[in-house]
Amino acid sequence: MNKALAVLILLCSFNAKGASWQITFPSPQESTSAIDEYPIQLLSLALDQTGVNYQLKPSEKLLSKGKALDRLQDNREINIVWGMTNEQREKDFLPIRIPIFKGLSGWRLLLIRQDMAERFAYIQQLEHLVKLIPLQGRDWPDTKILQSNGFDVVTERTHKALMRMLSKAQGDFFPRSIIEIWEELAKSELQNQIKIQPTLGVHYPTAIYFFVNKKSVPLAKLIEKGLEKAIENGTFQALFIENYADYIEKSKIEQRTFYTLKNPFLPEKTPLDRKELWFDGKISSQLEP
C-alpha cells in the first residue's frame, strides 16, 4: 500500500468516527403532547445505542403531518417523520419496520358525549356500533380503516375541531388510541360534556414507524440497528413502560369488550410474527421490563 493511500484511509476512518448526524424532525402544528415526545425519546435512545455523534432538532417551521410528508419526500427541511404505515407510505418513503408504540395506536377507546352513555350501554355487538357515526381526521389513515369496516365517518382537519363536533352532536363517538385519549381529555375544555366510554373499544392491527426519504438508506440502517439493540437489551421496553404503563392500567383493557376490525391497508411486510414488537392486550405481559 502506498503512503498516500494509507493517509487517505486513515482520514476517512477518522472522519467517519467524528462525523455528526444532523437529524431534523417536524415541529407539530398543534400543542406538543406526550405522544410527540416519546418518539423523540425513542429515536434518541436508538441513536445512543449505536455510539454515533448526532444532533436531533425540530424544524424551524410548524408542519402538519401532510406538509411534513411532502417535505420529507422532497428531501428538504426534515429528514425523518413518524406516522401510521400503509402501502402508499411504504412506497413513497423508506420505513423502519419496528412499531414504535408496539401497536398500541390500534387499541382505541371511545370518546362520547355524556348524554350518549345510556345508548352505548345497549351495544352488544359490532353491528350495533357500526350504525353510529365516528369522527376522525380528514387525512388520517384510521379514517379509511373505519370506512372499510362499514362505518360512515365524518371528518375534519384538526383534533380541536373534531372535539367541538362531538360536543355539538355532529358525530356519535371519537375513537382515540390509548396513548392519546387520557391526555387529550385532561386538556380539553369540554370535559363536562365528553367522557371515555367505560366498557367498549375497537382494535385493529397497525403500526407507527419512523420513515425517512427513500435515498436515506444509511440513516434508516443506523436507526434500525439502534432500535434492534434497544429491543435486545430491554431499554426499548423500559422506555415504553415508563411512558405508557399508567395509560394501559387506567384503560382496564381486560375488562372491556374490544371489537376487532380488519385493516386492509396493512402492508404485507408488517412484522406481525415478531411477538416481542407488539402489545398483546394483556397488561401483565407488558408492564414488566
Image (tube, rainbow, N blue to C red):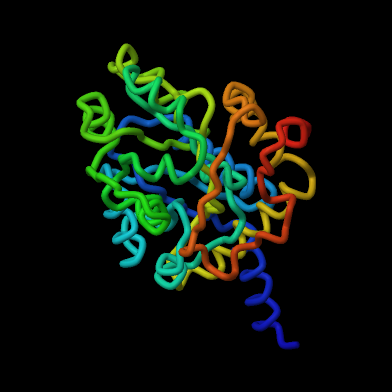
Q: Is residue 231 visible?
A: yes
The N terminus, quarter of image: bottom right
Q: Nearer the viewer, residue 190 or 236?
A: 190
Residue extending furthest toward the top: 192
Q: Is residue 180 visible?
A: no
List x then y, in percent, for residue 152: 30, 49
Q: Nearer the viewer, residue 162 or 229?
A: 162
Q: Give the image quarter of residue 20.
A: bottom right
Relative to 187, say whether 89 is above or below: below
List x then y, in percent, for residue 264: 48, 64
List x then y, in percent, for residue 237: 71, 39
The C terminus, quarter of image: top right
List x then y, in percent, for residue 162: 26, 34
Residue drawn at point x = 74 percent, y = 50 percent:
276
Residue drawn at point x = 46 percent, y = 68 percent:
90
Q: Nearer the viewer, residue 189 or 77?
A: 189
Classify residue 196 as left or right of residue 285. left
Residue drawn at point x = 49 percent, y = 38 percent:
108
